[in-house]
Amino acid sequence: MKSTKDFLKMKNEGKKIVMITAYDYPSAKQVEQAEADMILVGDSLGNVVLGYDSTIYVTMEDMIHHAKAVKRGACNTFIVVDMPFMSYHLSIRDTLLNGARLLQETGAHAVKLEGADGVLSHIEALVNAGIPVVSHLGLTPQSVGVLGGYKVQGKDAEAARKIVEDAKRCQEAGAFAVLLECIPKQLAKEITSLLSIPTIGIGAGVHTDAQVLVYHDILTYGVERVSKFVKPYANMNEQMTNGLRAYVNEVRNKLFPTDQHSFTMKEEELKTLYG
Ligand code: KIV
Ligand code: NA
């Protein structure tokens, strides 16, 4: 299993780091079998698994429940767990207790939290307490209400400068990686060269040290519409619905189960039974 030190080494050697989200036992097993370097138990859980229209409804209990299943499916992969909405804002004490729960109760290795303003001292406290932190900047879905929608961030010089400064501040606070979501590729390139820690991109172009995508988006599984930054590598919606529909039709037409799928008892036992 790779460690935070290995990720830093990969950045320095120009080797791409690959991260995929996972939310349960089978997805984690597949992501590990696909040899991704890191798993993210994202709070995108709320959208792609639980059916909410926002990540703000996801709770600590949700994250812990799912991260435990992920750990059982991928015990040899580095696992990052998202700190849910409002679990790292109230105080350093709350942040530490929640960060500790996410590692201790699930066996995950690091936490991720969104933003820089108001949480830098919390990042520092987590790292000082021994909890590795990934920062998440650019489009931060937990603040979608404040941002005014799921839009590309840092498009003008002023907004771009703010993201650069935030990335530096997160690195100084002790984050071991900075995730950049939905920002122009030039800005992601600049931040990647300015930081000594790895950048993880999603919708941030090819120059980040790592790439991450949501499991359901890669596989077109359960999701209807995907963003411009997603490339679908399979169509599970189609394959799975076809499989389920075939079963429904075979049962209705008495084509399933056949003898091949049935159990039998001996004739003599039947005679004894019915006399
Ligand atoms: O929750 C999530 O899956 C994420 C990624 C989209 C970066 O935070
Ligand atoms: Na997230």
Image (tube, grey):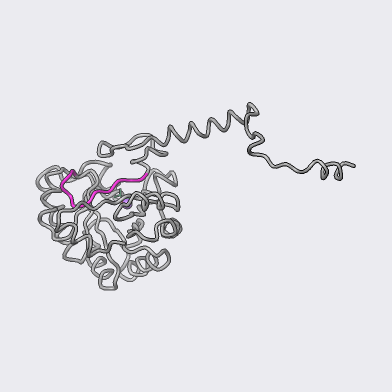
* Residue 213 is covered by the magenta coloring: yes
Residue found 24% across the figure and 48% down from its top: 211
Is residue 121 in view?
yes
Q: From this viewpoint, which residue is outermost toward the right?
A: 275
Q: Quadrant of residue 76?
A: bottom left
Q: Where is residue 160 in the image (x, y as percent from the top left)?
A: 13, 48
Q: From this viewpoint, which residue is outermost toward the bottom?
A: 129
Q: Using the image, determine if residue 34 lies above or below residue 238.
A: below
Residue found 37% across the figure and 63% down from its top: 108
The span picked out in magenta is 205-215
Q: In which quarter of the image is residue 38?
A: bottom left
Residue 60 appears left or right of 117: right
- The front one of 217 and 144 is 217
- The front one of 85 and 207 is 207
Q: Where is residue 28 in the image (x, y as percent from the top left)?
A: 40, 52
Residue 136 appears left or right of 189: right
Q: Position of residue 194 (x, y in %)?
A: 10, 56
* Residue 188 is covered by the magenta coloring: no
Is residue 43 in view?
no
For the N terminus, the image quarter is bottom left
Q: From this viewpoint, which residue is outermost toward the top?
A: 253
Marker count (numbered): 0
Residue found 17% across the figure and 57% down from its top: 11
Q: Where is residue 91 in the image (x, y as percent from the top left)?
A: 31, 68
Residue 250 appears left or right of 61: right
